[in-house]
Amino acid sequence: MPGEGVSFIAHGHILRYEEIVRIAGIFARLGIRKVRITGGEPLVRKGLPFLFEKLGRISGIDELTLTTNGTLLAPVTGRLGDAGVKRVNISLDSLENACYRLITGFDRLRDVHEGIDKAIEAGMAVKLNVVAMRGINDGEFVSFVRFAIDRSIDVRFIELMRGRYNGDFVRDRFLSSEEVYRRLCGEFTLIPVSPSYGSTTEKSYSVSGTAVRVGLISGVSDPFCGRCNKVRLMSQGVLKTCLFDTGGINLRDMLRGGLSEEEIEEKIKKAVEGRSEGPAQGKNPEGPGESELVMHRTGG
C-alpha cells in the first residue's frame, strides 16, 4: 500500500449485498460453482456472515470460501460456519512477531493464531497463503510447513507480484517458486498431486507421512493464464477476467441502469470469451515498465 495511505470509496459506490447476491446468481447460471469472498480485508465489512447465508442459498453454488488476514476471524467463525463457509484461506507472511509487525505495521499475530485455531475447531478446511520474500520471510518456509503439519492444515507459497507501488521492492525481494521448492525439499519429501477442483493456478504437493499439502503459485516465473478458470468481481462492480486487467465491465452500473439479468449474462460471456490466454503485461520482475496492478484495490 502507498505510504501516504489510501482514499476510501464512498459507500454508495460499492456493491450492496443484494447486488452481490444477484450477480452471483447470474454467474451460477453460467456455470460458476465456487464463490470466494476476499479483499482487502472482507471481515471489516459489517454483517459479512449475512452475505454468506444468502450466497449459500443460490442454486448451483457448491462451495463458499473466505480469504482473510485472520485478525478478525475468531469471533465470527461460528456464524460463518453456520452460513455454509467450509474453507478459509488466511494470508500470513510470517510466524515471527517482529517480522509480522514489519510486514503488516501492527501487532496482531496472536489474533491470527486464535482465528486459525477457531476455524479448525469449527471444522473448516484452513489454508495459509504465504507471499515469499527474499531477505524477509525466506528463513521461515520450513517453519510454515511444520506449523501446518502440527495443525493438519495446508499451506501455499505465492510469488511476489509487481504492482504500481512496489516495483523496486519486488526487484530486491522476488523469490521464485522453484527456489521455495528446493528449500523445502531439503527438509521434506514432497509428492506431486493432481490439482483439486478450483485449484488450476497452483502446483500441489503432499508432504510425505502427513495429510498436509503444500501449494506453489508461480504467477510470475511460470504464468498459468492458459489454465486459469477464475474471474474477479471488484467491490465497485467491475468484472476482471484477469488479475492484471486494467479495465473491465461494470456490472453494478448495468444492474442500477436497469439491464435485465439475461442482458448482463451476455455481457459477461463476451468479457470472458475475450480474455487473453497469455501472460499479463508486467508480470516479469525484470521486465520493462511497471504493472498498474493496485493490490489493495484488487484483493487477494
Image: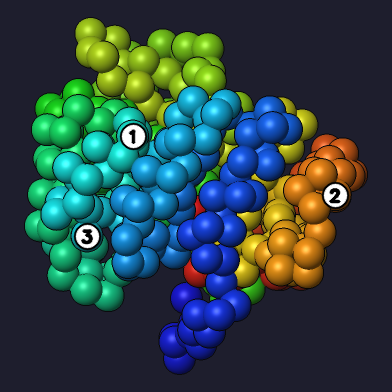
- Residue drawn at the location 57% of the way across and 26% of the way down: 60
Check disc 2 and report the residue beneath it.
263
Q: Nearer the viewer, residue 116 or 187?
A: 116
Residue 282 seen by the camera? no
Q: Is residue 240 above or below residue 194?
A: below
Across and down, in percent, residue 104 comes to 30, 69
Q: Secondary structure at mark 3?
A: loop
Query: What amino acid does circle 1 point to?
Result: Gly
Task: Describe residue 214's horizontal placement relative to residue 25 as left or right.
Answer: left
Check disc 3 and report the residue beneath it.
72
Query: What amino acid does circle 3 point to?
Result: Leu
Question: On the image, which quarter does residue 123 sit in?
Answer: top left
Q: Is residue 186 above or below residue 137?
A: above
Check disc 1 and report the residue beneath it.
84
Residue 270 seen by the camera? yes
Q: Nearer the viewer, residue 17 or 232?
A: 17
Between the residue at mark 1 and the residue at mark 2, the CA separation in whole angstroms equals: 30 Å
Q: Secondary structure at mark 2?
A: helix
Q: Earlier in the sequence, mark 3 or mark 1?
A: 3
